[in-house]
Image (cartoon, grey):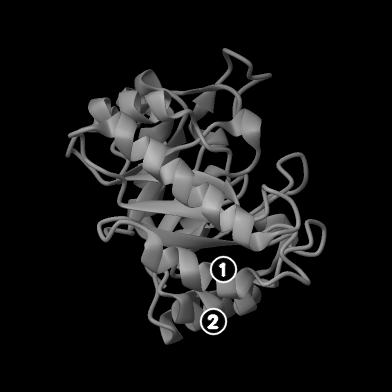
Amino acid sequence: MSWTGLLVSVRNADEATEALAGGSAIVDVKEPLAGPLGAAAPATVAAIARRVGSAVPWTLAGGELLDCGADAGAGGARLLRFIDDVLAALDSLPAPAAVKIGLSAGVDTPWCETLGRVAPALPRRIGLVAVAYADWQGCRAPEPERVFSAAAGAGCRGLLVDTFDKSGPGLFRLVDRATIRRWVAHARAVGLPLGLAGKLSLDDVALAASLGADVVGVRSVACRAGGLGRGEGDRLGIVERNRVRRAVERFQAAPRG
């Protein structure tokens, strides 16, 4: 699984075209109306995969492990059914490099054991990326460093720290640089690449890269007003290549931590 560079989340094939034209290293498929890791409809996923082809790796938001309620096992089964439906829609198109799964509401549930069952149950070519939340207390998720250790033991192939509450502060308003450096060091210690995301500005993109993130994920900073968006930098806007290009340039120009 290629898990490095600027990741741009898109919601349709036209946005995928803009992300590719702007130089995105990874195209991520999600539906922002459905939550921080909202899963797109399989037909939408297939249309985006057709547009991306083999130009760059693409990834897939799979929702929350606890989407089905308090039963983590049911959430794991839901994720596997979703992947089956996506693969059926893809037919002979390239499969996603990875699927991302969030762990909100995971406190006091067997989320760790479920990760250990889901990761090896995915098709071999699809990696599982465990998503920890910087605002973990508010969404009752496990704290990030617990997720890192559990993900490594479960066979996940990557880690992402994001924000759950998209109406709240961004990543760098929630945590300081020392915490990010600690997360980067922990991810390296367990042998997994780490992505950082969560309402990042252009300056935040450069900062995340300089602190050692392998992947920096964006949507809002890549969007212009339009569609359901309320203004520039709105995650419900429309991805635009020039905005993607500026974010790519900031990522590439940052001194690597």
Residue ID at (66%, 52%): 163
CA–CA distance in space, label 1 to label 2: 14 Å
- Position of residue 228 measured from the top left corner of the image (x, y, whole percent): 63, 16
Identify residue for label 1: 114
Callout 2 secondary element: helix
- Position of residue 31 measured from the top left corner of the image (x, y, whole percent): 54, 31
- Position of residue 238 measured from the top left corner of the image (x, y, whole percent): 50, 21
In the picture as drawn, the residue positioned furthest to the bottom comes out as: 189
**Label located before the other in sequence (1 or 2):** 1
77 or 132, nearer to the observer: 77
Q: Amino acid at mark 1?
A: Thr
245 with respect to 108 (left or right): left
Q: Could you tell me which quadrant the C terminus lies in?
A: bottom left
Camera-nearest label, 1 or 2? 1
Residue ID at (39%, 69%): 193
Identify residue for label 2: 149
136 or 103, nearer to the observer: 103
